[in-house]
Image: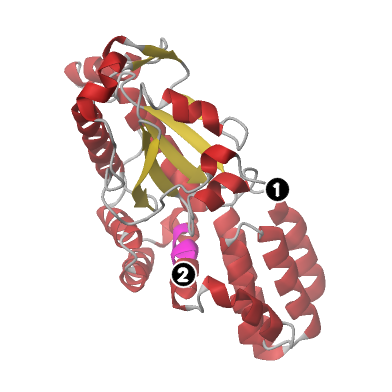
Amino acid sequence: MKAPEELHDIPAGQGSEAGAGGFAGGAGASGAAAAQTIPGPLVRDVTDDTFAQLLELSQTVPFILDMWAPWCGPCRQLGPVLEKAVAKAGGRVALAKVNIDENPAIGQAFRVQSIPAVFLLMNGQPAPLFNGALPASDVQEVISKVIELAEQEGVTGRVQTDEAGAAGAADGAAGAAGTPAPDAPPAVAEEIETALKLQAKGEYDQAIETLENYLKANPGESGKVEPLLAKVRLQARSAAAEPAGDQAGQNAQAATGEIAAQLEAADAQMNAGDAAGAMSRLLGVVAENSGEDRDAARARLVEYFSILGDDPLVPAMRSKLATLLY
């Protein structure tokens, strides 16, 4: 799909501080936004076709841009956290969600290499915020800093919706009564929060060690921890693999049937959003090999199943794997 004109030449620079891209104009240039509102909702889906409208809306209200995909476990963790934090802001910031599987032009324009990837869009200009599933406290701090930056730049409009401010008022009332809000997320163990922070920093080996130790001490939480652990392992392998520019060489090597190359190529497909292709490749390895090679492909498939969770692809792929094994 050809990228819309509005998506060309977007500065990516993932890893820099919010605002590093430079929001030209300042308070004077955008002061008219102070008394303006934009129609709701607070959380909206954005496509390649509607991105131009979002650029215009960001002149009035800053938008948090969440790049995600249905197969991404950490994305499903982060999404509700972002939505709750934005709701507490009372309409001073909004959330735009981009499914990069369905809208690849946006992902390519922002040079997204891993998800979840979160950006700020303000005054029609993007800036990177963070990668990975951060804890709720860290996300709330990011939102607060975005609001501060927006005030400095004069982007002080609001989203006009009954939702705006309602969540914040409800949380405050619940807190005054001494009871938590009904939709408050369950507490996250300190070790998992630590692992998520390490993951966001790209310190994957330490994150893996932290999660493995937590899982040993809390085997009953495997359903929650194993998907995250599988995702971090995938990220660690991908960080150590050949650069994306050598992908053609990887595919050529994988075509020879070398197991290590097949596994690496499958990881690359998963990271690119081609979960079906990655799992089909590994099913082929299982079908054509035995012993340790077959076990390695089977174990990698099980990791992918864990990452994908309740994705509709998983039951069919599990069934095919069981047929090949038994």
* Left or right of 180 on screen, residue 303: right
Above or below for 160 versus 200: above
Residue 223, how many percent across, how many down? 49, 55
- Boundaries of the magenta span: 228-232
- Residue at x 63% of width, y 66% of height: 269
Badge 1: few (under 14), some or many (20 or more) residues near its Cα, within 10 Å? Answer: few
Q: Is residue 150 above or below residue 178?
A: below
Q: Amino acid at mark 2?
A: Arg
**Amino acid type of the residue tagged 1 in the rendering:** Pro
Q: State the residue in front, 194 or 155.
A: 155
Q: Is residue 188 magenta?
A: no
Q: Nearer the viewer, residue 28 or 325?
A: 28
Residue at image x 44%, y 23%? Answer: 57
Secondary structure under the numbered disc 2 in the rendered image: helix
Residue 95 vs residue 104: left or right? Answer: left
Q: Position of residue 266 (x, y in %)?
A: 64, 71
Asked which quadrant contains residue 37, the reply is top left
Q: Which residue is mark 1?
A: 312
| Mark 1 element type | loop
- Residue 11 lies, with reference to residue 241, above or below; the image says above
Q: Position of residue 200 (x, y in %)?
A: 34, 58
The foreground one among 114 and 208 is 114
- The alpha-carbon separation of the residues under discs 2 and 1 comes to 23 Å
Residue 251 in sight in this render: yes
- Residue that mark 2 sits on: 233
How many labels, in total?
2
Instruction: Name the magenta segment's main secondary structure.
Output: helix
